[in-house]
Amino acid sequence: MTQNLDGFCYAVRSVVSDAVDLVYPPRCIVCKGMASQRVPLCMSCCQSLDRPLVDEVIRHIAAKNPEPAVDAAFALWIFEKNGPVQQIHRELKYGNRPYYGEIMGRIAGREIRESGGAQFDLIVPIPLHRSRFHDRGYNQSETIALGIQSILEMPLDASALIRTRRTRSQTGLSMSSRLENVENAFGVGRNPVPVGANVLLVDDIITTGSTVCSAARVLKESGVRSVTVAGVGFARV
Ligand SMILES: [Zn+2]
């Protein structure tokens, strides 16, 4: 199937999902009240979701990964098994709702801006392998990156990195298997990232951090000065 036809099919599927949401406006998955945005969360539940502690994510990544190549890390919410963030993430990834990613990205973008740490030259999402992109029709990390970009107003390059091989899902793998699974899984894409750039690397859920570390290593080897990681969920594993 051509890229154009992929785009068309994705557009049709999006219209169907939009129509369903219009007829059945999403309910908040936490309190069952009316959701205030196009994500199934009301404003009050959205504000009360658990957040990682200060520096928790970067300390976790440094503890789990030898030579992490990541300089700082941000995650919006705590991701728990069967919790609200997992439910929304499942819809983003498997329920054809790319706009959930954009909305969560906008919330994350505001937090990053307010924390004063928004000094980046480029936003780069973790890429999907092209066969997985073909199956899903979009890259969930790119939708989050687009939401962040709309707030931080800085360049985004979704083809700065490529996935050089199709990896297994990291879910259920041991720490050493996770490291092995994503080792050498990324390469530089069509457009070289500017030497000396400060990059905001966007993933959906940060678990052990082995995926972002593998991608960050490629960026650093191509001359990037710093890599800050941003995700919408952080799983305490
Ligand atoms: Zn609620």
Image (spheres, rainbow, N blue to C red):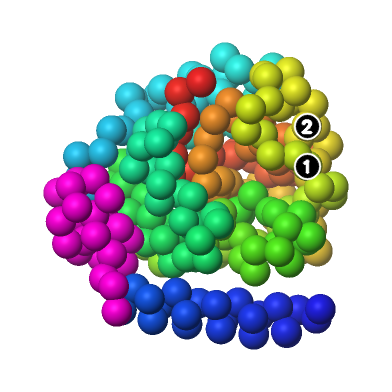
What residue is disc 2 on? 181
- Count of numbered circles on the image: 2
Q: Quadrant of residue 79?
A: top left
Magenta segment includes 77: no
Q: Nearer the viewer, residue 214 or 171?
A: 171
Residue 150 in view: yes
In magenta, the rendered stretch is 23-45
**Pointers 2 and 1 in contact (C-beta within 8 Å):** yes
- The amino acid at mark 1 is Thr
- The amino acid at mark 2 is Asn
Q: Write the residue at 33% across / 24% down.
A: 53
Q: Quadrant of residue 184?
A: top right
Give the x, y percent position of residue 226: 60, 38
What residue is disc 1 on? 167
Q: Image check: 233 left or right of 157? A: left
Quadrant where the N terminus sits is bottom right
Q: Quadrant of residue 214?
A: top right
Q: Nearer the viewer, residue 101 or 226?
A: 101
Q: Write the residue at 61% across / 54% down.
A: 124
Give the x, y percent position of residue 31: 18, 47
Question: What is the spatial separation of the Cα atoms under label 2 and label 1, in whole angstroms?
Answer: 6 Å
Magenta segment includes 32: yes
Q: Write the residue at 76% across / 35% down.
A: 182
Q: Image check: 144 left or right of 34? A: right
Q: Image check: 235 left or right of 114? A: right
Query: In this rendering, is residue 88 above or below 24?
Result: above
Residue 157 in view: no
User: Few, some or many C-alpha atoms within 10 Å of disc 2 (few <14, some 14-19, many ≥20)?
Assistant: some
Q: Nearer the viewer, residue 48 or 219?
A: 48
